[in-house]
Image (cartoon, rainbow, N blue to C red):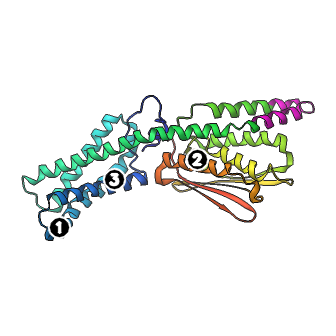
Amino acid sequence: MSIKQKARPAGWSRHPASLPDFRNLGVVLRILLLVNALALAALLVRNSALAALPAEGMEMAVRVEFPLILGVAALFLLQPLLRRLPYVAGVAVVLGVVLTVAAASQVLLAPVEVDEAPRALIWSLTVALAVLAYFHQRNAAQAPALAEARLLALTARIRPHFLFNSLNGVLGVLRRDPRRAEEGLEELADLFRALMQDNRELVPLADEIVLCERYLSLERLRLGERLQVSWQRDGAADAALVPPLLLQPLVENAVYHGIEPAAVPGTVSITIARRGPEVLIGIANPRLDAASHHTGNRMALDNIRERLMLFYDLEATLDTEQDADAFRVRIRLPFRSER
């Protein structure tokens, strides 16, 4: 699925059709498996003698694998163009690529009989249509799941205790520092505006960082010196497009489970780096005793992991690690930008 396409469906009243993202690892693997499964099914249907099956299988592999890999590579290169095209035009381009690759492969691999060429082209066209139909149906089936994941992500963030604690923090500094209290109310308004917005599109990572900074500024009103924050931020990752409300919930969990219950100061460490085609995000907080580590943390992590899967398929991961002193969350996702 393309990033724009995946960010839109969300189970709204109408599901927009769009092409899969041919640069997504999960999409490529599914194409390879689906085409080979269809070729194997066709081989079994037309095979009349079990003894001839291995030889026919080898011939099929020669005729199928080379154009399949070549076609996937061509679509990989054309993905930026396909993402900008309307759905119908994109389908036409994909089918044109498939037919061109199939015809060229037939000529290159072996002399083709006159009656064999049309059959090979028709088979390639049929398989291409079946693959596109599969991804379209998969996208439609995932739309309600994405909508539910977004709704859960939204409602899970609006914790009543956070609102009350933030207001109490503002009231606590109102008399001695009215200007800071006014800034706190502005930060609270900005934060809730971000939480309540539609959130259909992916957003720049820089916007998520700003949201986290506002959240942490609010928490400092009530936690004071108990909350220490260490940022290691790579500016090269700022333009990466990420699901909305990706960082703030993780940082809130780090504060809620690692700082708030403790009687001594603690540090939340946030690391953001770009490594070639990937963006790496790490968040660490002090680990307290198991009784204070609420199950809500696991629920939030599972929800974000599901959202990453829906947006990026197999290209993104979320892992956790804990030792005697710290709880760490690590996210790896592909670098995608608007440019």
Which stretch did the figure color magenta? 163-182
Q: Secondary structure at mark 3?
A: helix
Q: Tally the marks.
A: 3
Look at the numbered discs 1 and 3 and tell me whether their residues touch, using CB distance below 8 Å: no
Q: Tell me, yes or no, whether the highlighted magenta stretch contains residue 175.
A: yes
Q: Is residue 30 left or right of residue 44?
A: right
Please identify the quarter of the rendering in which residue 60 is found: bottom left
Q: Which residue is mark 2?
A: 303
Please identify the quarter of the rendering in which residue 170 is found: top right
Q: Secondary structure at mark 1?
A: helix
Disc number placed over residue 53 in the picture, else none: 1
Query: Is 245 or 142 nearer to us in this picture?
Result: 142
Quick one: label 1 or label 2, which is nearer the N terminus? 1
- For the point 62% across and 49% down, which residue is it? 299
Around disc 3, counting alpha carbons within 10 Å, would you say few (fewer than 14), some (14 to 19), or many (20 or more)? many
Residue 309 is situated, as x and y percent measured from the top left of the image, at 50, 49
Around disc 1, counting alpha carbons within 10 Å, would you say few (fewer than 14), some (14 to 19), or many (20 or more)? some
| Type of amino acid at the residue the image marks with label 1 | Leu
| Type of amino acid at the residue the image marks with label 2 | Asn
Please identify the quarter of the rendering in which residue 216 is found: top right
- For the point 29% across and 41% down, which residue is it? 93
Around disc 2, counting alpha carbons within 10 Å, would you say few (fewer than 14), some (14 to 19), or many (20 or more)? some
